[in-house]
Image (tube, rainbow, N blue to C red):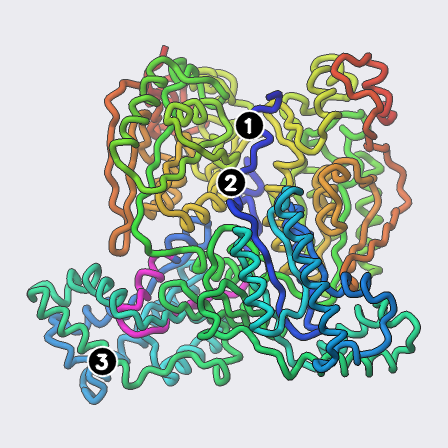
């Protein structure tokens, strides 16, 4: 095979891990589940969320009222328990038949009995269990949660907002009576993290292994303070104009114009405490210089290293390395340029950037095509297959704003013309294809 | 500037300086944590220094007599101890101010709320962020082991026999117990702290304020004290080594292959429990590991330093083609970045996840490369950025590192297979106008 090892890091997982959420409704369990899953998949750990509410909605076609959740509603209890069992079965299938490594069981799991059942299930199959409990008693946060994600839930599509809020609060009361949080003494042998008031305080107990340590680190770095992340590439560069990849050239005249326009755009956005990050390469630095504000340089944001293909045009790559060129088209995510990097390597080196982006608030990241694709894939939950083909044109700013369980994207083209540097996957990726087929999708250049 | 962007820090870790304050009864690992954390922060490029109040006390009270010095009703003793704390804080101020330090670790018991309030006020006055690190442990075995490992050898007990020393120290701990006010979830909710319970079984983390505190928490949550050893070695001698060429991705020479076989035998003889073996993704380390016939894991992060335009050149060729670069490298080998390549400083950055995982693991053998091994060694042996690029890491030699007391015991084992020397010392003349002769003076012989 062309590359013996494609991953940058050892995978560090032996037995699958079952992450079990714990907490009253509207405590951010689903938010955390989805975000964590997105992060783990991005760093290469196959992860999937199993949301019990989803199973319940499929079992009980029409939600009527909070009364479904009353602790003495035996009919409902039966259904809810059956749903839990189905979810666990699906988790088992995910681990055994679908090569999953981490499953996130997103449900309230507020009673000791329920948690004991799950532990039993995991023990039988040799899965490690890690609990993530979210505890929150701030009524403002709870109400904000409800407004953001509950009122638009399928459960409430035919209700008016006031009614929905009242019903949901009653639903929470149903759980409160029987809620037993993870206990310092009784649960001292379990592995868990307790998150208090959206990250004010954490209690971490018995972290067992690498993946749990990474999960804890991630959870301790995320926050819910509203903010926006701006992603863009450097202005058009001299090498861009020539259709050459990589290198460390400066901006073209149009690239310089973009930088000035970017400065105007940023100013007009009136962003509070904006941090600006660039790579160590001339073209991002020159772009940031035009902004007239302080910026920080990250080597980790440097463009993908194309190794022996640095500064070549695609035509030259086809001429000198036709086989490499084809192999790259076959698996653009894992393909590593000789003496260079793969997208997979890029993701690995960008992980500290992502971690710091999570910690920060408003940030503008001025970077490069492959780098931007990796960052975008993280925020928009794109797969390894889609990632290397994400469209990140020059002179276009993407504004990402977290909302509900995902990210709102606004794309702003700053009206300064630039070459197109996006090369689609050609139809023919065979190593014995002719040059014409290989170069079919190469964008125009000088 | 010559280097342009290469000297800039990757991300601003701290705006204002950070004062880390340990909290805990004696023999709870405060100094162990202080020293280890300081070593880690310095290695990743954050200037850090520890200030151990016990040290100040020993400088002040020349001869330690007995635990009675620490009795809560010993007014004379209290006065001196308070003065020592003040002197230490003065030095902290100097370090974080004039000396350009970024983090100071104030290592003392700090067991009363009152003492901690004084420190918080001091920090506020000076514009420092405060982060408390409390170690709580009631396991008598752990405490006894601490005392044996680090207290018995303390200057306080040089003239005592073991039993006397232990007895005295236990009474010393008692002196603090009555007035100990542990950090409290409610009373201290405005403070930033991590409480480490039972050597890492459980952690309580409150109000992490910024990046550096987040990194500190992550680090503290990954270290352990389970006895183990870390084995570091380079790949066997490679074909390019023999030719005196740097970098590249060549296979092992005949002698290199012999080393691999000797290494296999050595590892077997050591009878190491659950040994993990790590290599880079370059042929020469992989071929070396293959000879061990055990599973091994490949890290791209362990790849040798990228020499950019100088890859696969001999030093003579570098001097011929890039004499200016060659001299600049000799002027500041740690920060110098090869054109289209990396610096040692970059290497440390990319090795940080390796170090973090090494901390989590137990027995590990890392088969790597000269520059990489220098970086890892510098971390374990607390070597400065100036010393790091000149650490001696010869081929065919295994270094066995075993944590002991506050540091690391190093055993160097040469596996008796000859190899070229690849170590180039810093030449005397590092001037950019130096002659070729001066530049090449310290180049080791090769084919």
Check the picture and name the quadrant holding the C terminus of chain B. Answer: top right
Whether residue A13 sits left or right of residue A383 in the image: it is: right
Any mark on residue B237, and which?
none
Disc 1 and disc 3: Cα gap in Å?
A: 57 Å
Local packing at callout 3 (Cα closer than 10 Å; few below 14, some 14-19, many 20+) is some
Disc 1 and disc 2: Cα gap in Å?
A: 12 Å
Residue A371: x, y in percent?
43, 35
Q: Please give the residue where the numbered disc 1 appears in the rendered image.
A: B5
Q: Are marks 1 and 2 in contact (CB under 8 Å)?
A: no
Q: Please give the residue where the numbered disc 3 appears in the rendered image.
A: A173
Residue B372: x, y in percent?
70, 40
Highlighted magenta segment, given as a residue range: A13-35
Q: Is residue B94 above or below residue A299?
A: below
Query: Residue placed at 75% from the left, 25% from the top?
Result: B330
User: Is residue B287 in view from this perspective?
Assistant: no
Chain letter for mark 1, please: B
Q: Please give the residue where the numbered disc 2 appears in the rendered image.
A: B11
Residue B301: x, y in percent?
61, 42
């Amino acid at each position: 095979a062309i590359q013996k090892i494609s991953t940058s890091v050892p995978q560090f997982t032996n037995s699958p891990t079952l992450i079990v959420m714990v907490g009253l409704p509207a405590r951010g369990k689903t938010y955390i589940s989805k975000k964590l899953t997105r992060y783990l998949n991005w760093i290469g750990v196959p992860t999937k969320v199993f949301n019990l509410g989803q199973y319940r909605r499929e079992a009980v076609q029409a939600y009527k009222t909070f009364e479904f959740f009353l602790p003495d509603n035996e009919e409902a209890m039966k259904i809810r328990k059956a749903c839990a069992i189905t979810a666990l079965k699906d988790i088992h299938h995910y681990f055994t038949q679908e090569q999953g490594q981490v499953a996130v069981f997103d449900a309230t799991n507020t009673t000791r009995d329920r948690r004991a059942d799950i532990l039993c299930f995991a023990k039988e199959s040799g899965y490690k269990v890690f609990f993530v409990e979210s505890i929150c008693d701030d009524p403002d946060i709870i109400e904000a949660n409800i407004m953001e994600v509950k009122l638009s839930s399928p459960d409430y599509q035919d209700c008016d907002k006031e009614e929905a809020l009242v019903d949901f609060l009653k639903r929470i009361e149903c759980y409160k009576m029987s809620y037993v949080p993870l206990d310092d003494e009784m649960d001292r042998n379990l592995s868990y993290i307790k998150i208090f008031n959206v990250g004010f305080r954490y209690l971490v107990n018995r972290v067992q292994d690498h993946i749990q340590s990474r999960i804890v680190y991630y959870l301790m770095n995320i926050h819910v303070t509203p903010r926006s992340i701006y992603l863009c590439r450097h202005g058009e560069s001299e090498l861009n104009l020539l259709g050459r990849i990589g290198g460390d050239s400066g901006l073209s005249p149009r690239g310089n114009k973009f930088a000035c326009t970017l400065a105007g755009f940023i100013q007009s956005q009136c962003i509070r405490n904006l941090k600006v990050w660039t790579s160590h390469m001339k073209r991002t630095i020159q772009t940031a210089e035009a902004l007239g504000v302080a910026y920080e340089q990250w080597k980790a944001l440097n463009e993908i290293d194309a190794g022996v293909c640095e500064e070549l045009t695609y035509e030259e790559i086809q001429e000198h390395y036709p086989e490499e060129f084809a192999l790259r088209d076959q698996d653009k995510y894992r393909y590593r340029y000789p003496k260079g990097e793969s997208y997979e390597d890029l993701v690995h080196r960008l992980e500290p950037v992502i971690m710091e982006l999570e910690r920060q608030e408003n940030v503008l990241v001025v970077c490069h095509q492959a780098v931007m694709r990796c960052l975008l894939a993280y925020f928009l939950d794109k797969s390894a297959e889609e990632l290397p083909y994400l469209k990140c044109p020059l002179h276009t700013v993407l504004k990402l704003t977290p909302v509900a369980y995902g990210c709102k994207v606004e794309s702003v083209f700053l009206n300064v013309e630039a070459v197109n540097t996006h090369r689609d996957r050609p139809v023919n990726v065979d190593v014995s294809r002719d040059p014409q087929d290989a170069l079919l999708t190469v964008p125009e250049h000088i | 500037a010559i280097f342009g962007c290469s000297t800039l820090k990757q991300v601003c870790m701290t705006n204002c300086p950070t004062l880390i304050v340990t909290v805990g009864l004696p023999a709870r690992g405060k100094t162990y944590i202080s020293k280890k954390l300081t070593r880690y922060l310095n290695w990743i490029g954050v200037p850090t220094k520890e200030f151990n109040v016990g040290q100040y006390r020993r400088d002040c009270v020349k001869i330690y007599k007995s635990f009675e010095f620490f009795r809560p009703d010993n007014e004379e003793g209290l006065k001196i101890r308070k003065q020592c704390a003040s002197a230490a804080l003065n030095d902290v101020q100097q370090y974080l101010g004039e000396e350009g330090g970024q983090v100071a670790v104030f290592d003392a018991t700090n067991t009363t709320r009152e003492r901690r309030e004084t420190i918080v006020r001091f920090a506020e006055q000076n514009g420092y962020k405060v982060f408390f690190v409390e170690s709580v442990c009631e396991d008598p075995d752990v405490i006894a082991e601490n005392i044996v490992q680090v207290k018995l050898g303390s200057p306080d007990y040089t003239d005592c026999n073991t039993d006397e020393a232990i007895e005295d120290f236990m009474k010393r701990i008692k002196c603090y117990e009555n007035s100990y006010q542990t950090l409290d979830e409610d009373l201290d909710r405005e403070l930033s702290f991590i409480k480490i319970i039972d050597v890492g079984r459980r952690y309580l983390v409150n109000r992490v304020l910024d990046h550096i505190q987040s990194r500190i928490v992550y680090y503290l949550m990954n270290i352990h004290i389970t006895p183990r050893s870390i084995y570091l070695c380079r790949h066997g001698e490679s074909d390019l080594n023999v030719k005196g060429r740097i970098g590249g991705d060549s296979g092992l020479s005949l002698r290199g292959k012999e080393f691999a076989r000797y290494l296999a035998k050595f590892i077997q003889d050591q009878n190491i429990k659950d040994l993990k073996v790590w290599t880079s993704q370059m042929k020469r380390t992989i071929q070396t590991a293959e000879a061990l016939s055990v599973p091994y894991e490949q890290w791209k992060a362990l790849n040798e330093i990228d020499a950019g335009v100088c890859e696969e050149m001999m030093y003579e060729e570098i001097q011929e083609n890039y004499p200016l670069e060659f001299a600049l490298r000799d002027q500041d080998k740690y920060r110098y970045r090869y054109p289209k390549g990396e610096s040692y400083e970059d290497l440390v950055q990319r090795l940080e996840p390796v170090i973090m995982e090494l901390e989590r693991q137990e027995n590990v053998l890392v088969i790597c490369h000269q520059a990489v091994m220098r970086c890892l060694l510098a971390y374990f042996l607390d070597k400065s950025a100036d010393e790091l690029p000149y650490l001696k890491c010869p081929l065919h030699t295994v270094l066995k590192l075993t944590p002991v007391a506050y540091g690391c015991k190093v055993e160097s084992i040469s596996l008796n297979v000859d190899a070229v020397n690849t170590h180039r010392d810093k030449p005397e003349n590092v001037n950019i106008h130096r002659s070729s002769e001066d530049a090449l003076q310290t180049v080791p012989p090769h084919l």
